[in-house]
Amino acid sequence: MAASADLLEKPEASKEADEPRTIEPGLATADRVFHHSARAVAMVVLALTASIGLFLGYQSIPTLRHYGLKFLTESQWQPHLNILGLSAVLTGTVEVALIALVVGFPLALLTALYISEYSPQRLRPTLVALLDLMAGVPSIVFGLWAYFLLEPRAIYVARWLSEYLGWIPIFKVDFDTHAAFLGSVLNSHYGASALIAGLAVATMVIPLACSVMRSVFSQAPLGEREGAMALGGSRWGVIRAVVLPFGRRGIIGGTMLGLGRALGETVAVLLIISIAFDVKYKVLTTGAITTSALIANSFGEATGAQLSALLAAGFVLFLMTLAINTLAAVFVNRSRSGAGTDA
Amino acid sequence: MSIAAPPKGTALAPGAGVQAHLEAVNVSAWFGSKKVLDRVCLSMPETTVTALIGPSGCGKSTFIRILNRMHETIASAKMAGEVRLNGEDIYAPGRKVTETRRRIGMVFQKPNPFPAMSITDNVTAGLKLTGVRVHGEAKEQLVEQCLTRAGLWKEVRDRLDQPGSALSGGQQQRLCIARSLAVDPDVLLMDEPCSALDPTSTRRIEETIGELAQAMTIVIVTHNMQQAVRVSQQCAFFLAEEGRPGVIVESDSTEKVFGDPVDPRTRDYVNGRFG
């Protein structure tokens, strides 16, 4: 048959109704191997998380059965009197984490904006490296620094707060604001407080949150940045119109990562606070306790019932972190972010 | 701080812009130590469309970015010479770069609407960026005016609340034009505005350019010869010969450059013999 005739020949449309046909993925062997091994590894990670939750939950059953709801409302932790409760511990945990976040969030955000938007180009790589280094410093180092350097100075901040902002309930103190230094800094009523523990944790949260925020800010699309500049926008204008909307995921993600660290931070808090099982909102005064500090402090001599109670405390902390991260994920997914549309 | 919207008919009414004459005098440019433009002079008169043509890498984009001080946003970029807007050097010390960029708007090769903002907010983004607040009816009017001038109003009037990123490429580019118009620039620079678009969208934008040119100065970089002929009244041919910085080989009325060019290199290029 001639070539021209071939071209003219048309396949005939079928008379029957058509149905969607199944299409096999047709993956290459390498793809299939990688697909399955990657999935296996991912499953292990998920299984680990789930098993932690299940283990803690299972271990805390005896405690919850024994103390019931009182386990959450009782403030004292006195195993020898058979009084165990988490209310003071949870309050302290939330207080320290919130202080760390309130202090750390604005500093982290501004630092990240400075590094990604304002810092001189030549200095930038050094600043980024320093920041990432800070994020990796072990918390005991921060703890020692906070104990020896921060605390003796922070008590004056605390005194200032109580003197001038004492009308705000959380900054109120029960003693004469000035008479709170009994001879030496170490005897100050302002020392070893939730505020100072929170400040110490803030110094750890800042580099972590800042590092995440900065890396997202620096990915804000050049096209959009230029668009904002070409409209007559200042650098601040570019930040507001492009960098912050694009970086919203990074801001939330970094903050949540920071909050996670703040909730779980143990050793620095333990170094600074003097343990007191009171449900109190006066964050300037000596004495506080957090969940992780309680576990670390009591774990060594814990046996039987008390061990189960500590595991129950751990379980509550686990649930808190899980709830916060889930909330954050929901919020991030709902918010419209520039990330992903690359222009 | 909120600044009250000026009354209609002054700074906010698009199209009422000052007639602006843009002039480049001995403009050179470098990236690091590499010189990419050598003493380029070009006059871009008011209500005229000036097309910049030439092969890739000849410095057209660098030149147009120098015209509204976008060049200096690149770390290693340097420039020399003057760019005069109605006789005043936009690089003169003490001149605010933000004000210069507001008066000399720019549309980029790749449409770059703000994806997280609605269509309305995209149009008024420039006002927010320059500290001007508009509300209510004035805002609605401005949005309609700008979108109409950019030839997009009919297509989006029912969905002004949708994000800018939901539009097609051609619509996004017209949204970017509308956004530029909202701050009432005297000059509009367009760096290959149609190179990422389909023929229909390209035609719409060319129509838009024709309408805008009645009230403002337009400079457009294009790789499309036919487009240069269709939209421009004058034309500058840029060329960077092997290892040398870009220069303007020839600039004249579009008719002359395409119909009867003086330089043989111009003739070869506009007839599609190279580049």
Image (cartoon, coloured by chain):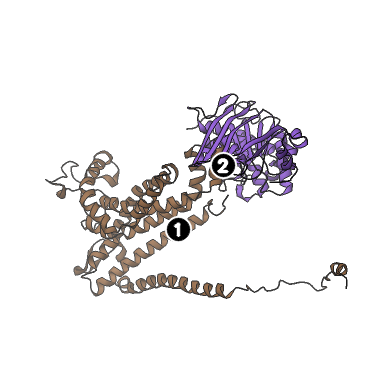
Q: Which residue is mark 1?
A: A327
x, y percent for residue B266: 71, 38
Q: Which residue is mark 2?
A: A227
Which is nearer the eye, A167 or A97? A97
The residue shown at (52%, 45%) is: A242
* Colour applied to chain A: brown
Say if labels 2 and 1 share a chain: yes
User: In the displayed structure, would residue A222 be above or below residue A323?
Assistant: above
Which is nearer the eye, A122 or A266? A122
x, y percent for residue A79: 21, 68
What is the quadrant of residue B214 in the picture?
A: top right
Q: Viewed as shown, does residue A32 lie left or right of A281?
A: right
What is the quadrant of residue A296 in the picture?
A: bottom left
Q: SS class of the residue under badge 1?
A: helix
What is the quadrant of residue B67 in the picture?
A: top right
Instruction: Rate crowding at label 2 as few (under 14), some (14 to 19) or many (20 or more) other CA atoms within 10 Å.
Output: many
The residue shown at (53%, 51%) is: A337
Residue that lies at the very extreme toward the left in this rendered image: A183
The answer to whether any part of residue A289 appears in the image is: no
Three-letter amino acid code at disc 2? Gly
**How far apart are the alpha carbons under marks 2 and 1?**
33 Å
Chain letter of disc 1 in the image: A
Please report whichever mark, 2 or 1, sits nearer to the chain's N-terminal start: 2
x, y percent for residue B81: 55, 30
Identify by letter the chain in purple.
B
x, y percent for residue B116: 55, 48
Q: SS class of the residue under badge 2?
A: helix
In front: label 2 or label 1: 2
